[in-house]
Image (cartoon, rainbow, N blue to C red):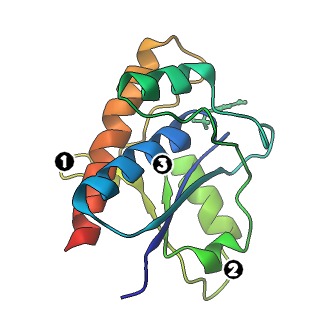
Amino acid sequence: MDRPAILFVCLGNICRSPLAEAAFRFEAARLGLDVEVDSAGTGGWHAGNPPDPRAIAEAARHGIDIAGYRARQVALEDFARFDRIIAMDLKNLARLSEIAPAGARAKVSLLLDHVAGLEGEPVADPYFGGPEGFEQTWREVEAGARALAEQLAH
Ligand code: 4NP
């Protein structure tokens, strides 16, 4: 099988989707999965910026360095380049469905739809809250990343 390519998408690509990318890279490595992984935002305001310092700190608490990540906006080419595009919440999912070209390669889904019992749930946006929000974000993206990696491994 070809190497699967997975793109994680939130709004700004500085909080949730970089953490999802980091958690998924970690889980894929743990399972020995050969995958291409990236993240992007439906919005472009933060393009070129590193992740939010609170996201960098949260990843570091789990031994993962995401300080070198840079935000970018989702591009139409992503629908041809990736097999799976994984949205963090329903707004991002709706936006992706709106811009998806007809006959796109990528299958779009919600991250927590991959976790039994959490179907339809969003990864809460921690941007306007305190640092404790990022702990919650990590728990959610980690659960989603683990479930998705396990599905792809079988
Ligand atoms: P993210 O969080 O979508 O998880 O990266 C946000 C980042 C920036 C903004 C909102 C959410 N913003 O309004 O700039």
Label placed on residue 101 = 2
Q: Which residue is drawn at the image coordinates 74% and 65% (left, top)?
A: 75
Q: Position of residue 110 (x, y in %)?
A: 42, 56
Q: Which residue is drawn at the image coordinates 55% and 83% (left, top)?
A: 105
Dot 2 falls on a residue whose secondary structure is loop
Amino acid type of disc 3?
Answer: Glu
Mark 2 / mark 1, whichever is N-terminal = 2
Q: How many marks?
A: 3
Q: Quadrant of ligand 1?
A: top right
Compared to 107, does 129 lie above or below? above
Amino acid type of disc 1?
Answer: Gly
Alpha carbon of mark 3 to alpha carbon of mark 1: how far? 22 Å
State the residue in front, 116 or 120.
Answer: 116
Alpha carbon of mark 2 to alpha carbon of mark 1: how far? 31 Å
Report crowding for label 1: few under 14, some 14 to 19, many 20 or more residues within 10 A (C-alpha): few
- Between marks 3 and 2 in the image, the one whose residue lies nearer the viewer: 3
Q: Which residue is mark 1?
A: 117
